[in-house]
Amino acid sequence: MLASFQSLNSCIQNQSYGILDFRAKKYSKIRSYCVRCKSSLDPTLNEEKEGKRKLKILIAGGGIGGLVLALAAKHRGFEVEVFEKDLSLVRGEGQHRGPIQLVSSALAVLEAIDENVAKQIMEAGCVTGNRTNGFADGVSGEWFTKFDLSSPAVSRGLPITRVICRMELQDILVNAVGSDIVRNNSKVVDFIEEPSKVTVILEDGQQYHGDVLVGADGIWSKVRSKLFGRQEAKYSNYTCYSGMTKFVPPYIDSVGYRIFLGLNQCFVALDVGNGNMQWFAFHKQPPMSTDPPEGKKKKLLEEIFGKWCDEVVALIQETPENMILQRDIYDRDMIYSWGIGRVALLGDAAHPLQPNLGQGGCMAIEDCYQLIHELDQVPNTGSDAICSALRRYAKKRIRRVGIVHAATRMASEMLALYQPCIQFKTGPLAHLSTLQITHPAFPMARAFLQYLLPEFMTWMIAGHGLSLKSQRERGKQNKLR
């Protein structure tokens, strides 16, 4: 495990980029902060040539990634259409995944795409990054290690991490993109690529033509299956119970979210605003073909986590049975080609992540920015230019996403090794288990995490690899010229 951490740390430290300029606004008195990256989506830098026809982009999937991509495309002057099988699937807060966490890098991308939309999202969200966050022992409740999400953001002039209701986020994005662009009840089941265009085929037989097709249709992506053949998703060995409750714990003002650790188990508790607490309980077990019987989920969780600390037990007890849901956790191995020809993948369709770091939506949002940046450089609608742009997009995103993907899997593997005390279950030393003797590897693992986590979290929230500058700052600079 130590070797895996060292490998991950080396990957974080050894990345190289061009120039990145984040502009500070209300979040900091610092005027600007520069890290390495490349150019931005500045319309003054990429002026449209006379007679140049903007590409028409077809997007399969109206989730967070598909909608943000459509918004970015619309602002860059592309013709765009989004095909979503059912926008109502995300309805009902807590439905499977609950609220979505948006870290500073994702919020900065949204600001660069559309500052007004980003403002709406941030006003609707609940700020968690300005409180204590980190890992704690599930049984004792004692902090294992903490991480700071606020200082790295504030020092760079970035928005602070927050969570937002998925349906509220979806409503904001759909309204910004426009109902004329988002086609609901339109499931993409196939596509045909030709030398001069790509055609999507919907479940009802309708066909639509465009220059580029982006598969943003999630882990079970039809576009991905068509590109690379049907491949089974990989079961994480964990099922996840999730719940939401109207409950305000006494620590609400000081703790944003806490990840309670146990052997082959963990319990994530976070404030989602408006007097609500959301939690996720991960439990190692074979995949389940059906949910536990109605009325039995809460009782089962009280048995599994009944001896954990008061904070965990209270959240389960305060949650109504009908607000507890269960789903098995799947991801896929990383692939290093995210498209073929005029077709590319984005978000979970390209790189589904386990949810234990809350980075799936954030990585999809970052994908959107990079993809539109590359397509904006395409000089014409020719196949070669489009193919090159889609390859550049994947190449520039794969390393960062690959590190996050590895980190999510590593987090799951850590649970199988989590053992703060030596267990004397049988034999002449069995009576020593009551003494709670610290496992000798535990302090070393804790010290290493305390060293690695701040560096990793800073890297994750700083938005490395993208070039972002707000629309407002560009407008100000243009007036000064």
Image (cartoon, rainbow, N blue to C red):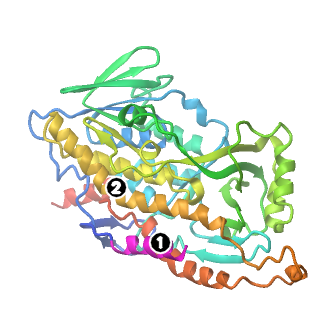
Give the residue displayed 68% in from the left and 50% down from the top: 240
SS class, disc 1: helix
Of the numbered discs 1 and 2, the one sitting upstream in the chain is 2
Horizontally, is 179 left or right of 48 in the view?
right
Q: Extreme front residue here?
A: 427
Horizontally, is 232 left or right of 464 in the view?
right
State which region is magenta.
1-14
Q: Mark 2 packing: few (<14 Cα in 10 Å), some, or many (20+)?
A: some
Q: Nearer the viewer, residue 164 or 389?
A: 389
Give the residue displayed 78% in from the left and 51% down from the top: 246
Label 1 amino acid?
Phe
> Is residue 60 placed above or below 475 in the rendered structure?
above
Q: Is residue 222 magenta?
A: no
Label 2 amino acid?
Arg
Corner quadrant of residue 69: top left
Q: Which mark is residue 456?
A: 1
Q: Is residue 13 magenta?
A: yes
The residue beneath circle 2 is 397
